[in-house]
Amino acid sequence: MSAQQASPFGIDIRGLTHRYGAKTALDEVSFSIRRGSFCALLGPNGAGKSTLFALMTRLFVANQGHIKIGGVDLAEQPRRALARMGVVFQQPTLDLDLTVQQNMHYYAALQGISRKRATTRIAETLKRLDMDERASEKVRALNGGHRRRMEIARALLHEPQVLLLDEPTVGLDTRTRQAITQHVHDLVQDTGLTVLWATHLTDEVRADDQLVVLHEGRVVADGVCAVIRGKETLNDAFARLTGQSKARNA
Amino acid sequence: MGALRAMVAIIAREALRFFMQRSRFIAALVRPLVWLIVFAAGFRAALGLSITAPYQTYITYEIYIVPGLCGMIQLFNGMQSSLSLVYDREMGSMRLLLTSPQPRWWLLLSKLLAGTLISIMQVYAFLLIAYFIGIDFPALGYVAVLPALIISGLMLGALGLLLSSTIRQLENFAGVMNFVIFPMFFLSTALYPLWKMAEASTLLRDICAFNPFTHAVELIRFALYLEWNPWALTWVMLAFAMFLAGSILGYDPGKALIMRKAR
């Protein structure tokens, strides 16, 4: 227990390898994220981000390697590790025909939160999002940005230590995208949450964020964004790291 | 406590969604009613049914096919609620469900119970309409059929869950209709009794006798007449145990049968 609490990492991934038949989706992936920091996971489509998320959310188990969430090994104590994690999936997971409140309560119950506590937490959360007046509206009536914010807030209902987001801004307009990126950065700042944010959009990564670049199943860069990109723009650095500049010039 | 809360929430969500989607409810009722009113009316003249258990007198064809149509409602529902999990639209919800810190088999069982409950509500709505068009059963039969519906609903839901975790080709409903629903429904006692099948071919008869859906239908049929059918019950329970074990295995993160769904 004390060893788990002492772990300085919110997420710690060691030697993660996964194959689908003959195809290697992840090859010896290792990186760790300090508690209370924001890490962007950048990679082109097919880099292995989806596989990594599937493994981290325990949809299935990796062939090799370890994943620790808040110091708890996902393979050894899956339920404890899952309880420390909130997830926002790329696919929307809200029931459009149910109300905001009903969606929230469903998730809270899945996490085993008591009805009474859930009611309090949900009220607080909606108030913080300025959505308390819309609690009994159907989710269908909300715009894309509000839905995503709600999903993020819902993923935090059980007060997890770690928040995973898989391309959370897909399909949103630029302003909403920025607002949501800002919102999650604020959460890290204010609450000490550890965030792993997968994306293929370089403008969502800030200079002082941790950046892990995944390419063809391998980690090709891991460090502070400003250091990795050096004097280049992140776009150029990303293209260089993933060999896309060649493709573009050809 | 947390586990129970999760189960209740999963069932409540399914029920709420069901009541919100009125079109789904109506579609679920129209299908068996069309069979009952159109199909049965046409076949009534063509088909002579002799007395077989649990019937004690000659019956009309409409009365014969009602239990089969109850089974059909549950068959469609089982396939729909489980397979909707693998359609893109619902994939996110399934993944959300699986991140719950409850044991996975418990989550899957809760999902099955939720689907079964929905199918039972549909069956009772259907029986009510049938009652108003003059097809009724012993009053206590409506109570006795409940446990039969629970078991058959679970069995058919588990089959859907098993298919959703293992068979990739069945990711659209048309495929399921052609390769699962139609064969199961037509090669069963839903529309004709076994002896009628035997007149056509003994092979057909044997397939029907093997089909777990036949036993689900017979279980429902006997229960409606307050009769006990231990053989059908055993078959349905056995099939349920097998399908459930298969789907728990299919969704086992270590076995990775669902792996390809993430790609």
Image (spheres, coloured by chain):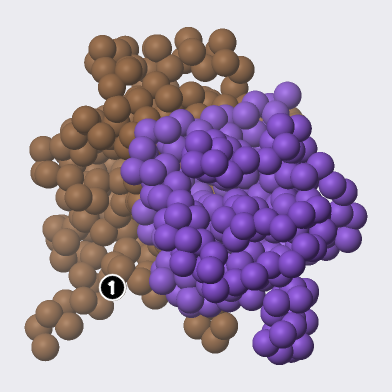
Total residue callouts? 1
Element assignment for label 1? loop
- Write the residue at 35% across / 71% down: A46
Quarter where residue A109 is shown: top right
User: Residue B241, located in which quarter of the rendered image?
Assistant: bottom right
**Looking at this view, is B224 or B153 the one in front?**
B224
Q: Residues within 10 Å of mark 1 (few under 14, many from 20)?
A: some
Q: Residue, x 17% and y 45% (percent of image)?
A: A172
Residue sitting nearer the eye, A171 or B117: B117
Q: Amino acid at mark 1?
A: Thr
Q: Give the residue at x 18% y 41%.
A: A177
Q: Which residue is located at x 76 percent, y 76 percent? A: B195
Q: Which residue is mark 1?
A: A242
Asked if residue B203 is positioned above or below residue A139 in the image, the reply reads: below
**Colour purple, chain:** B
Q: Is residue B34 above or below residue A149?
A: below
Q: Is residue B139 visible?
A: yes
Drawn side of residue B246 relative to residue A208, left or right: right
Residue sticking out furthest to the right: B230
Judging depth in this view, the residue of A219 and B160 nearest the camera is B160
Which subunit holds the residue at mark 1?
A: A
Is residue A56 something one can see in this rendering? no
Pinpoint residue B246: horizontal percent, then vertical percent.
Answer: 72, 65
Indicate the colour of chain A. Answer: brown
Q: Quadrant of the C terminus of chain B?
A: bottom left
Which part of the image, by quadrant, shows the N terminus of chain B?
top right
Residue B37, position as x, y percentages in the image: 45, 55
Residue B42 image point, x, y percent: 46, 67
Q: Is residue B95 above or below residue B47?
A: above
Residue A56 position in % (x across, y down) = 54, 53
A192 lies above or below B197: above
